[in-house]
Image (cartoon, grey):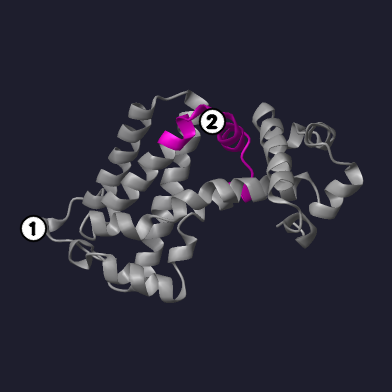
């Protein structure tokens, strides 16, 4: 996270620094990015930069988290829209992210993040649902989910479903970036994954669901 001195700057100066950083991180992945390029474009000194951020990683992940916030904010609304269908809500949220990934000004920043992913980058993407998994917010999420269509016994299993789907969504985004899939191809692939999640991959005797 930025230091307090960054937030003490005027909005115009903050935006100029973040815009310069986004240009640099869109041009090259994080490990190749140059602080010199960022501060030159932003018109700040190197000393000032380190008063605002610990290092370029600190700045990078602040930008990345800000971009993911817009996706985090509407999950409960999507659950209500789909009458509590967890998978349908997650698929629409994933589709929204793919649309964002296709917007030109966002495309290369996010593509570099996905193509040159690290454990911390993966954690940022797969934690999109984290705000909904703890405390009072999770209670609200639980109340919005139609459990009648889920083969789960408790909240622990519900949390695990979130983790599985988040991992599959991240893998789909990686696949789209690496293989150059179209939005339609990536969406179709993710829908297939979700279909298999819904159906299960083992046939059950007498049409019943077995629990291990």
Q: Residue at the spot x=72%, y=57% of the render? A: 7
x and y, in percent, of residue 19 in the image: 67, 37
Residue 142 visible? The answer is yes
Q: Secondary structure at mark 2?
A: helix
Residue 122 visible? The answer is no
Circles 1 and 2: CB atoms closer than 8 Å: no
Camera-side residue of 96 and 153: 96
First in residue order: circle 1 vs circle 2: 2
Q: Quadrant of residue 44?
A: top right
Q: Is residue 170 left or right of residue 10?
A: left
Query: Which quadrant is the N terminus positioned in?
Result: bottom right
Q: Pointer 1: what residue?
A: 206
Q: Secondary structure at mark 1?
A: helix
For the residues labelled 1 and 2, the Cα–Cα distance comes to: 48 Å
x and y, in percent, of residue 22 in the image: 66, 36
Identify the magenta region.
99-122
Question: Compared to 152, does 51 lie above or below?
Answer: above
x and y, in percent, of residue 202 in the image: 23, 50
Q: Pointer 2: what residue?
A: 107
Q: Quadrant of residue 182?
A: top left
| CA neighbours of label 2 inside 10 A, class few (<14), some (14 to 19), many (20+) | some
Q: Is residue 129 magenta?
A: no
Q: Which mark is residue 85?
A: none
């Amino acid at each position: 996270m930025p230091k307090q001195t960054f937030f003490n700057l005027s909005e115009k100066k903050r935006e100029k620094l973040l815009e310069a950083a986004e240009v640099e991180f869109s041009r090259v992945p994080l490990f190749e990015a140059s602080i010199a390029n960022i501060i030159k474009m932003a018109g700040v000194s190197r000393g000032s930069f380190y008063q605002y951020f610990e290092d370029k990683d600190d700045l990078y992940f602040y930008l990345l988290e800000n971009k993911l916030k817009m996706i985090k904010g509407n999950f409960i609304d999507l659950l209500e829209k789909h009458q509590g269908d967890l998978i349908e809500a997650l698929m629409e949220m994933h589709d929204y992210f793919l649309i964002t990934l296709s917007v030109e000004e966002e495309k290369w920043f996010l593509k570099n993040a996905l193509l040159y992913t690290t454990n911390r980058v993966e954690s940022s993407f797969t934690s999109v649902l984290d705000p909904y998994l703890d405390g009072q917010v999770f209670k609200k999420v639980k109340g919005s989910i139609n459990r009648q269509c889920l083969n789960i016994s408790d909240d622990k299993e519900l949390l695990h479903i979130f983790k599985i789907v988040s991992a599959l969504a991240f893998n789909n985004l990686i696949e789209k970036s690496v293989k150059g899939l179209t939005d339609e191809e990536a969406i179709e692939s993710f829908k297939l994954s979700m279909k298999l999640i819904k159906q299960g991959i083992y046939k059950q005797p007498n049409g019943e669901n077995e629990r291990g």
